[in-house]
Image: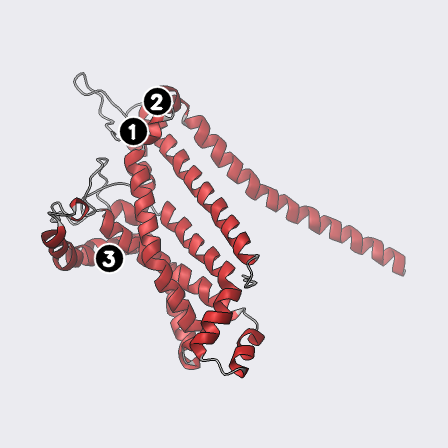
């Protein structure tokens, strides 16, 4: 085989490989577009009936009767989704980043792999197991030792910490369990990002007499901050779409309550619990519209996260991830 022929065949093979990878990349784009089109089409009846007011309607009553006709509003589900996800992120992000720092920078070598394996194992546990643990173990503990004392102490002055707590299921307990679910994801990604930081980033400051903490704070974290933010946003994405554990723990109430200890609902749990039992076309269309709203929220937050990562990676500290 001549050199020129070998070069032509190699270029031909590169072309085929490029087309194959392009095809699979376009499949991903097509799936995203297909999900958007299907949910938008399925929501046509609800959009025609309620318009934009559907997103802010606070009442959800699927039972149609002469005295109380069926009415649908997505605000209880959107509110529950945003609160449970953001509160879970507030709890999980600092703890997960701290665990990642320990595993990458501070843990003894003999403990790094076992502890890392345990973190990855927690991330692989199905959400139904977390939900079962929450119902059987965490809700009784939370109700007795956390919710009841807080409600008795602050419930009179702070309505969002009051209300009956004997039910157990509610928005706050769901947020805590979701935080436990996304914690391993944030920790594992933080660990991997910090491990990818070049040794020179640490050695320069160590040579100047900096402490271990100063090296981490002044050099390692600024370098890896874009990747860490990406991991945190990935955890937020999982929190937004969490279905099974939320359905088991949140109480699935479509009333908008002031108290964090009372039952609520999320977009994912509402669709999962009612879609198969929808009693009218409008009911089904309303549920699909809730799913469309969740899709839109997820898309907007992911775009915002990508913008944040991009801006962070261009910062003066030269963060990379």
Q: Where is residue 62 in the image (x, y as percent from the top left)?
A: 25, 27
Q: Name the residue under label 2.
A: 50
The residue that appears at 51% across and 39% down in the rendered structure is: 32
**Which mark is first along the chain, 1 or 3?**
1
Q: Mark 3 points at which residue?
A: 133
Q: In this view, does 260 lie above or below 52?
A: below
Q: In this view, does 180 lie to the left or right of 236?
A: left
Report if residue 1 is visible in the image. Answer: no
Q: Where is residue 179 in the image (x, y as percent from the top left)?
A: 32, 56
Crowding at label 2, few (<14), some or many (≥20) Cα neighbours within 10 Å? some
Regarding mark 2 in the picture, which secondary structure is present there?
helix
- Look at discs 3 and 1 and give the one toward the viewer: 1
Q: Is residue 293 above or below residue 282?
A: below
**Quick one: quadrant of the N terminus?**
bottom right
Verify CB contact (< 8 Å) between mark 1 and mark 2: yes
- Look at discs 3 and 2 and give the one toward the viewer: 2
Q: Residue furthest top?
A: 66
**Which mark is first along the chain, 2 or 3?**
2
Q: Mark 1 points at which residue?
A: 57
Crowding at label 1, few (<14), some or many (≥20) Cα neighbours within 10 Å? some
The residue that appears at 84% across and 57% down in the rendered structure is: 7
């Amino acid at each position: 085989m001549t050199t020129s022929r070998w070069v032509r065949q190699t270029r031909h093979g590169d072309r085929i490989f490029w087309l194959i990878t392009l095809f699979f990349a376009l499949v991903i784009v097509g799936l995203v577009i297909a999900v958007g089109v299907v949910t938008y089409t399925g929501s046509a009846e609800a959009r025609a009936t309620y318009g934009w007011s559907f997103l802010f309607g606070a009442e959800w009553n699927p039972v149609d009767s002469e005295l109380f006709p069926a009415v649908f509003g997505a605000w209880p589900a959107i509110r529950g989704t945003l609160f449970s996800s953001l509160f879970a992120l507030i709890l999980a992000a600092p703890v997960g980043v701290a665990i990642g720092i320990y595993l990458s920078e501070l843990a003894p070598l003999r403990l790094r792999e076992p502890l890392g394996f345990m973190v990855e194992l927690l991330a692989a546990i199905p959400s139904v197991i977390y939900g079962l643990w929450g119902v059987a173990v965490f809700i009784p503990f939370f109700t007795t030792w956390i919710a009841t004392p807080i409600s008795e102490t602050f419930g009179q002055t702070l309505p969002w910490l009051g209300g009956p707590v004997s039910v157990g299921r509610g928005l706050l307990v769901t947020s805590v369990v979701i935080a436990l679910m996304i914690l391993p994801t944030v920790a594992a990604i933080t660990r991997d990002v910090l491990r990818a930081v070049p040794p020179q980033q640490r050695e320069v400051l160590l040579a100047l007499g900096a402490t271990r903490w100063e090296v981490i704070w002044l050099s390692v974290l600024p370098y890896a901050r874009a990747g860490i933010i990406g991991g945190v946003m990935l955890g937020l994405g999982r929190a937004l779409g969490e279905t099974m554990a939320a359905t088991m723990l949140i109480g699935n109430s479509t009333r908008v309550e002031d108290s964090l200890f009372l039952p609520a609902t999320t977009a994912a749990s509402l669709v999962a619990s009612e879609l198969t039992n929808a009693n009218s076309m409008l009911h089904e269309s309303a549920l699909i519209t809730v799913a469309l709203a969740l899709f839109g929220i997820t898309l907007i937050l992911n775009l915002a996260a990508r913008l944040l990562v991009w801006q962070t990676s261009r910062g003066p500290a030269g963060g990379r991830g």
